[in-house]
Image (cartoon, rainbow, N blue to C red):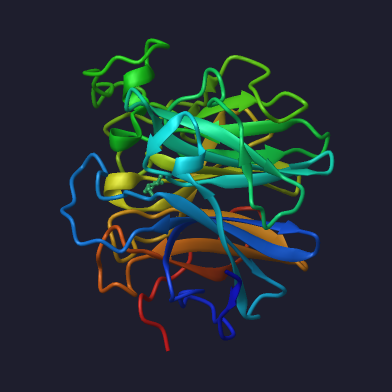
Amino acid sequence: MVKATNATKPNHPIVEHIYTADPSAHVFEGKLYIYPSHDLDHDGPSNDNGDQYKMEDYHVLSMDDIGAPVVDHGEVLHVKDVPWATKQMWAPDAAYKNGKYYFYFPARDKDNIFRIGVATADNPAGPFTPEENYIPGSFSIDPAVLVDDDNRAYMYFGGLWGGQLEKWQTGSFVADAEGPAEDAPALGPIVAELTDDMLTFKSEPQEISIVDEDGNPLLAGDEERRFFEGPWVHKYNGYYYLSYSTGNTHYLVYAMSKSPTGPFVYKGRILPPVVGWTTHHSIVEFKGKWYLFYHDSSLSGGVNHKRSVKYTELQYNEDGTIKMLDYKPYPD
Ligand code: FUB
């Protein structure tokens, strides 16, 4: 199904015929492509493990220009077509390298453990053909891939609580592992360089350190600043910007580094809490302007697992820091 909506406006849902979340936006072939989660419209209960996020498939959306109608390219991958996956197709991302498009997605494997898979296509709208197995050595959720200017590619991933990051502190999955004590360094997101074929990790995944202006690691009890989920890395004026959600305190925040693997220095907030529990975003440059793609639950009247993708322009201060945005769930 290919469906076009009416023109879009900043801070309004970009589509209303399905619920969408976790938007990863990229410019491919001169257009904006958005790779979101596809939230199921169900009325089941919610819990802290995220069982309400029962997604089964992915759609790809595109816009010829900011404000143009959105094309829904239809279902591009379904869990039933992924040999290793069983459920919960959460926040995805896509990348382009060497003439091919790569779609990265987390899902639970047959042991109920979140892993990250990859699927490929010859064009950005898919459909995508999954690899037989998940990426060896992958774990947790929320993959985001940066193909750097030197053509090296890095995957950033990880998420606490339902995203299982706490359970991998020893390097293996420990089902009953808890997070660090409040006065211990917080868990950071994970980075792994991808192999040239973009299908496996070139190096052992490593934890990213996020520090304050004095170089001290953010602590696990610092819940308004520490990493929770949804890492995204973009580049601007020679700096790498790592932005992420603080989860249970509901902010989008960011940190900066001169290196793609950090350490990153915490800088501040990008977006205040939105309607709904989760907040998840991407940042993209298109035709000389910068945009934040994000989601909220305004269209569903606040149902956490029925979210809608929106976008708004993002601006920098002269020193390279990001101007914090206002948020209005129901703008004019
Ligand atoms: O969409 C399911 C999960 O909710 C994502 O993986 C998280 O980042 C949060 O947005």
Res. 104 image quadrant: top right
Res. 218 image quadrant: top left
Looking at the picture, tell me which residue is in the foreground, 212 or 97.
97
Query: Can residue 214 be spotted in the picture?
Result: no
In this rendering, would 117 be left or right of 269?
Answer: right
Q: Is residue 303 above or below residue 54?
A: below
The single residue placed furthest to the bottom in the displayed view is 332
Query: Residue 246: percent from the left, percent from the top?
Result: 36, 45
The single residue placed furthest to the left in the displayed view is 45
- Residue at left offset 28%, top offset 49%: 249
In this rendering, would 207 be left or right of 150?
Answer: left
Looking at the picture, tell me which residue is in the foreground, 34 or 89.
89
In this rendering, would 30 be left or right of 332?
Answer: right
| Total numbered labels | 0
Q: Quadrant of the C terminus?
A: bottom left
Q: Is residue 327 above or below residue 214?
A: below
Res. 256 image quadrant: top right
Query: Residue 158: percent from the left, percent from the top?
Result: 44, 33
- Residue at left offset 69%, top offset 34%: 258
Query: Residue 324: percent from the left, percent from the top?
Result: 49, 62
Q: Is residue 109 above or below residue 267?
A: above
Query: Can residue 192 be spotted in the picture?
Result: yes
Looking at the picture, tell me which residue is in the foreground, 330 or 115.
115
Q: Quadrant of the N terminus?
A: bottom right
Looking at the picture, tell me which residue is in the foreground, 289 or 190.
190
Query: Residue 124: percent from the left, percent from the top?
Result: 71, 54
- Residue at left offset 32%, top offset 49%: 54
- Residue at left offset 25%, top offset 18%: 177
